[in-house]
Image (cartoon, rainbow, N blue to C red):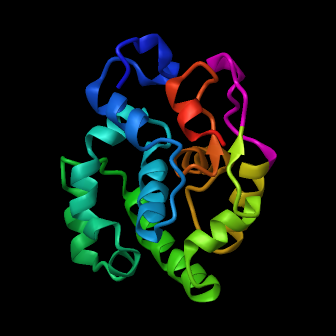
Amino acid sequence: MPKDDSRLCAWVGQDPVMIRYHDEEWGVPVHDDQKWFEFIVLDAFQAGLSWKTVLHKRAAFHQVFHGFDPERVAGMTEVELEEARHNPAIIRNQRKIRSAVDNAGAFCEIQDEWGSFDVFIWSFTSGQTVHNSWRKPGQVPATTPLSDTVSRTLKSRGFSFVGSTICYAFLQAGGVVNDHLLDCFRYRELAP
């Protein structure tokens, strides 16, 4: 982490977990299906909440959702879902918990069809990261035509909690889009 916090993206704040996530993960191109599924699950749970809240519960989500193994999550039993709904270590939203299981099934179908979710998700940008050039936090959009397209496609394949804003968040997280601000030290590290 740089000593000058002003060289970080504004959303990071002073929380050490957020800083580590920003410095080590956010915007790094992902090519691992399990990591993609993790981002889809976590971003769905973020809907209506702060990323900081979700990130601080990440370890518990990892445990409840079988290390974000989509096949295992797709096969979760009603007993496991009920245990999740009563687990104070995670966000206990029944619709979001059910969505994680349903999305796991849809995720596995994409894997079967495309060989991997990674190949599928990167096909939207022909395998290339979109490097934006934002100078101020207010310039970073919540959605884009890309996230609109990904959202529509995922919904048509049976996913839920994949609105355009959520899709844009996991495209940013997984490095399909580089939205680090131009003066953030990570922008230069991730740009070509």
Q: Is residue 60 above or below residue 180?
A: below
Q: Is residue 6 left or right of residue 66?
A: right
Residue at image point 42% right, 44% down? 25
Residue shown at 41% from the left, 68% from the top:
34
Image vertical order of residue 57 relative to residue 94, above or below: above
Q: Give percent across and percent down for residue 63.
A: 21, 62
Residue at left offset 66%, top offset 64%: 122
Q: Residue furthest bottom?
A: 112
x, y percent for residue 91: 31, 47
Q: Quadrant of the C terminus?
A: top right
Is 96 part of what is drawn in magenta?
no
Q: Position of residue 132 (x, y in %)?
A: 72, 35
* Apparent side of residue 112 relative to residue 38 in the rendered image (left or right): right
Closer to the camera in the image, 116 or 61: 116
What is the tally of numbered marks visible in this picture?
A: 0
Q: Residue at x 56, y 88 (%)?
A: 112
Q: Main secondary structure of the magenta part?
A: loop
Query: In which quadrant of the rendered view does residue 110 lie?
Result: bottom right
Relative side of 73 to 113, left or right: left
Q: Left or right: 139 with respect to 57?
A: right
Q: Quadrant of residue 159?
A: bottom right
Residue 76, image x, y percentages: 31, 78
Closest to the observer, 8 or 109: 8
Q: Quadrant of the N terminus?
A: top left
Q: Is residue 19 above or below residue 74?
A: above
Point out the stretch of residues depicted in magenta: 132-145
